[in-house]
Image (cartoon, grey):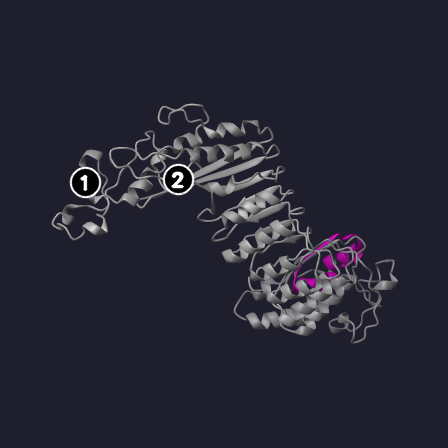
Amino acid sequence: MRSKYSADALRYLKRHIHRVREVKVQAKALVFPVNSMIRRPHHPYDQTTTTTYSAHSTTSGTASDPISLFSPDPSVLPQMSRLASIDHNTDDLAKGGQYFLKVEYSEYKAMPRLAWFLQSHMALTSVHLNVSNIKSFVYAHMLIQPISSLTSLKELDLNFRMPPLSWVSFVQSVFNRLPVSIEWVLSNFDPIAGAVAKNRLHLRSLDNCCLAAVHIVGVLRPHTLTNLRNNEDCLASAVNSILRKVSTNHYRSVTEIRIEKSPHVGGSVVQAILWNCTALQHLLIRGDPPISTRLKHLVEDEWVCRGLRNLEITVELRQVITSAVDMSEVPGVHEPTWIILEKFYRQLGALSEIEVLNLGIKSKEMQWLETSSRPRITAGRRPQAQLGQDDSNEKDDDDNRSADEDDIDPSKLNFKALRANSADASFPALLYLGKGMSEVREMRGYLSWPGGLRNLRELRGHVQAMTTETSMTVGQ
């Protein structure tokens, strides 16, 4: 709804105002639907309109009514009988050089109209308020009464700043009466956390994993939270603490966990989610770089979330390698690694309801991506104990050069780097769908285990391999 109307447009709006189902206006334009509802005696626009008046829509015009602040002579005010949604936005007022003057104008002009408009339409089911800033407690309190009276409200989206005291009063008065979810952006929003904790609201959805949310999750009634999402940069300790509480107190009710941004999610936390959350349907743990979970943490017990439909995790592969005495030999891979992989893919194969599987593999070495299983050996620094010997040969050594086995001096090798380079020599079998490979003898391709997933409609994956020389992600 634009801010300027002709006389004919305003007359048409007043005539058909009872048919309006949705109002979407900027701050200044709110005056037009309000004026279209006002019926004044002897007004040229109102004499041609026949309207059925409601007893609930009359006002006295006294100073106590919000409409008296901007309409000194109101008469009968008919409701929009079909109105179900209002979207009020004042972002345009915050643009330009005179920021504070425009914000003050929006408070003085828009808040009384908005409060009266909400109070006149108790059947609203959707309200979206995007206000730049509310500095005055008077205008903040002006919104509490009409919003808390919207008994049919199903969707409430509030996006504005208020003083902390106003927020506490607002939350206690509004969210204690309405069955709505709470979403906020500020990571240190303690006032709303305290108000929620005091009133023990029956939340269903929590869209932030900040420090304040830890307090909220701790006081919620058990098995009431259904959705947990986080798309903001938060402390890893807060995210892990919330996930532990969810897996302990809400394992029967939570159906969706989406962690879009977090520095780290502990392996024990992922364990608790997979082992306890019986109703879980969506589990997504993302990050940039990807948040990985060690393979051994995923297979130590059976998963109970058999109803998973969407799974997105990154598995970190680590192996314990024993250094070979003869450097020409390839360090052997321990057999338990393959047993763990088999358990992991059997767990995936048991998810009969899964529809989307996005599996990431993270490793320390790119060698296993090559066709040959022969490890690439990198010459490194000499051990510390040998630095006092002959240093004349050090200037001929290149710390980052690759060498063939015949040219290697074992005394100059970095054993730790060698073990890392050789650790993943047998991993091609991990991504192989068949039952045999020439490079890896008698090793089965473990992606053949989830072959019974008949509901699977999307299969994605990526491989991230890193060394001291390079970092690369392939296969997305």
- In the displayed structure image, the side of residue 456 where residue 35 appears, left or right: right
Confirm whether the magenta stretch covers residue 434: no
Q: Nearer the viewer, residue 436 or 288?
A: 436
Q: Nearer the viewer, residue 71 or 414?
A: 414
Residue span colored magenta: 9-35
Q: Position of residue 416 (x, y in %)?
A: 30, 45
Between discs 1 and 2, the one toward the N terminus: 2
Reading the image, the residue beneath label 2 is: 319
- Residue at 50 percent across and 56 percent down: it is 236
Q: Which label sits on residue 409?
A: 1
Q: Which label sits on residue 130?
A: none
Decide: few, some or many residues near mark 1? Use Cα within 10 Å; few <14, some 14-19, many ≥20: few
Q: Position of residue 284 (x, y in %)?
A: 55, 44
- Residue at 50 percent across and 27 percent down: it is 448
Q: Quadrant of residue 38?
A: bottom right
Above or below: residue 218 compared with residue 250: below
Residue 461 visible to the viewer: yes
Above or below: residue 224 compared with residue 89: above
